[in-house]
Image (cartoon, rainbow, N blue to C red):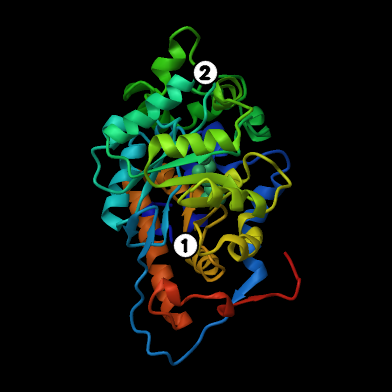
Amino acid sequence: MRIKDCYNTADFRRLAKKRLPAPIFHYIDGGADDESTLNRNTAAFDTADLVPNVLTGAEQADLSTTVLGQQLQLPLFFSPTAMQRLFHHEGERAIAAVAEEMGTMFGVSTLGTRSIEELGRHKAPKLFQIYVHKDAALTADLIERCRANHFDALALTVDAIVAGNRERDYHYGFTTPPKLTAASLLSFALHPQWSFNYLLREKFDLPNVSHYIETGSTIAASVVEYLDTQMKRSISWDDAAEMRQLWGGPFAVKGVMSVDDAKRCVDIGATAIIVSNHGGRQLDGSRAPFDQLAAIADAVGGQIEIILDGGIRRGTHVLKALARGATACSGGRLYLYALAAGGSAGVRRAMERLRDEMQRDMILMGCRSVDELNESMLNERNGQTL
Ligand SMILES: Cc1cc2nc3c(=O)[nH]c(=O)nc-3n(C[C@H](O)[C@H](O)[C@H](O)COP(=O)(O)O)c2cc1C
């Protein structure tokens, strides 16, 4: 199987599974506990059906939308994800390059593997994902670096103040940086190309935070350890409001699920909410973003931008979210599998396939622009769920 044999996210997932040592693949693919939220995130889209309008004369579909002050050519952008150089040696560079080609935005994780300074030089719109750290100076420094390096938006992640329980990581022996353990040894040996790239290219690093963690303490051995040791657990709405003010630019709160919280985001003057459960990696048993979208759009639609994040594997998933009131969508695994499968060439093909699917399906829906998608084009399956 090669990249050109991949037509959809499921194909890229299969190829990623072949290319990556098992601990790395399962770090991307897995979720918390029983993974019921992870699975529901995608299954939720099948509880509503698109209802097209015909004979509308729609020949072309304009997919552009404006979100967080950025005019994007696609209503879908790259969610921030940690550790990208573990998945492919190009890492964040591949994502930044494809974002520019496709006219969309890319998110950069605090736990990214390329620096704010390097990524700031890419032309595509960029969002930095931040946490409230125990060390206020670290948070303030990250914000200053984003400002100095022309980041366009900041997203405060609020659903990861402690790390989720990702049991696949224990089963397969995932550690950061990767270590040879009894559980993972064979898998690294069976993927010599990955292991070669990992060992001989630039040393693994988390350049946005490593100098902070290294001074006075040891570098966090894993994401779990990072979240559990560096995050301020008692984070409050005051922290969020303060951060919004300190930053002063387009600001999103990532990981909002309740209607009350969505209203509080309006109150603190956030530009957008990212309706998300961290891709099912944190609180298992929590509701899927798409299931919760109608309630949120009813309460705060028109007052704040709504970004639907999680479970998107198909262009039609994006169209359903837009019809239900989202301003735009974002996704993680939909590009991470492709990155692992083939670096920038994989990500480019995955995003082109999704773009073409959205365009084709908008025309089939009878819509010329994303504004024309609305709730009347979406029907619940009479309470029947998957
Ligand atoms: C491997 C991986 C790493 C992630 N790292 C981060 C992170 O560092 N910060 C963050 O806010 N979200 C992170 N996320 C969550 C994504 O931003 C996004 O919310 C999630 O991937 C959406 O679900 P999807 O993968 O089904 O699209 C990560 C997700 C994955 C799969």
Q: Residue furthest right?
A: 383
Q: Residues within 10 Å of mark 1 (few under 14, many from 20)?
A: many
| Residue at image coords 30%, 57% | 102
Q: Nearer the viewer, residue 4 or 48?
A: 48
Q: Is residue 245 above or below residue 192?
A: below
Secondary structure category for the residue under label 1: loop
Question: Measured from the top left, where is residue 374 in percent x and y?
Answer: 53, 75
The answer to whether the beta carbon of the residue marked 1 is less than 8 Å from any atom of ligand 1 is: no
Question: Measured from the top left, where is residue 8 in percent x and y?
Answer: 47, 60
Question: Measured from the top left, where is residue 114 in percent x and y?
Answer: 34, 31
Question: Residue beneath label 1, please?
Answer: 327
Question: Residue beneath label 2, please?
Answer: 220
Q: Can you say which quadrant of the picture contains the C terminus?
A: bottom right
Q: Nearer the viewer, residue 139 or 6?
A: 139
Q: Is residue 334 above or below residue 131?
A: below
Dividing the picture into quadrants, the one containing residue 230 is: top right
| Residue at image coords 65%, 59% | 292
The answer to whether the beta carbon of the residue marked 2 is less than 8 Å from any atom of ligand 1 is: no
